[in-house]
Amino acid sequence: MTTALLVIAHGSRNAEANGDLHHAVAQLRERGEYAVVEPAFLELAEPAIEDAGARCVATGVRRVILLPYFLSAGVHVREDLRAHRQRLAERFPDVSFVVAEPISRHPALIDIVAGRAREAERKMDT
């Protein structure tokens, strides 16, 4: 079974902010772990979640992981993304859709945060 990864960010009117998601998607594509890796935005930017989900399905995948590129599991993750998942599942009944956990409390995140703090501290020392 082939699986698509639909990486979902909130979306911004600021193109540079949206570029962070496109960069992450490009990096994930390079890894080659998923047949398809697509970006999507909850609001304020394109592509919309359901449009990007349909693009995934059009490639012939049978499973789609909706991966929230969010730091916490607030309303957008727990309610909005689940609603999008339900609509996609109804529209494409032969494809499995699942919402992954957000970045949230993943142990690697603490290392990243600590690294950013050290970078800032080094700037203060110069």
Image (cartoon, grey):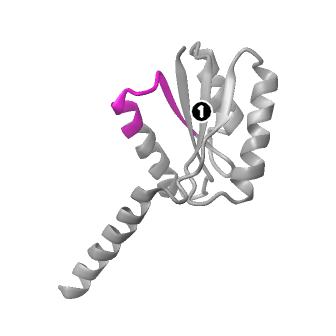
Q: Does residue 9 lie above or below 119 as drawn?
A: above
At 76% from the left edge and 26% from the top edge, which residue is drawn?
89
Q: Which residue is mark 1?
A: 65
The quarter of the picture where residue 95 lies is top right
**Residue 126's spot in the image, x, y percent?**
17, 85
**Residue 77's spot in the image, x, y percent?**
69, 51
Mark 1, Cα crowd under 10 Å, few <14 / some 14-19 / many 20+, is: some
Quick check: 54 left or right of 1? right
Q: Nearer the viewer, residue 91 or 98?
A: 98
In the picture as drawn, the residue positioned furthest to the bottom comes out as: 125
At 34% from the left edge and 75% from the top edge, which residue is drawn?
117
Quick check: 57 left or right of 81? left
Q: Nearer the viewer, residue 126 or 2?
A: 2
Magenta stretch containing residue 34, yes or no? yes
Q: Does residue 58 lie above or below 41 as drawn?
A: above
In the picture as drawn, the residue positioned furthest to the front comes out as: 107
Residue range in magenta is: 27-39
Q: Nearer the viewer, residue 59 or 112?
A: 112
Q: Does residue 7 lie above or below 96 as drawn?
A: below
At 27% from the left edge and 73% from the top edge, which residue is drawn?
119
Label 1 sits on a secondary structure element that is strand
**Residue 109's spot in the image, x, y percent?**
43, 60
The N terminus, quarter of image = top right
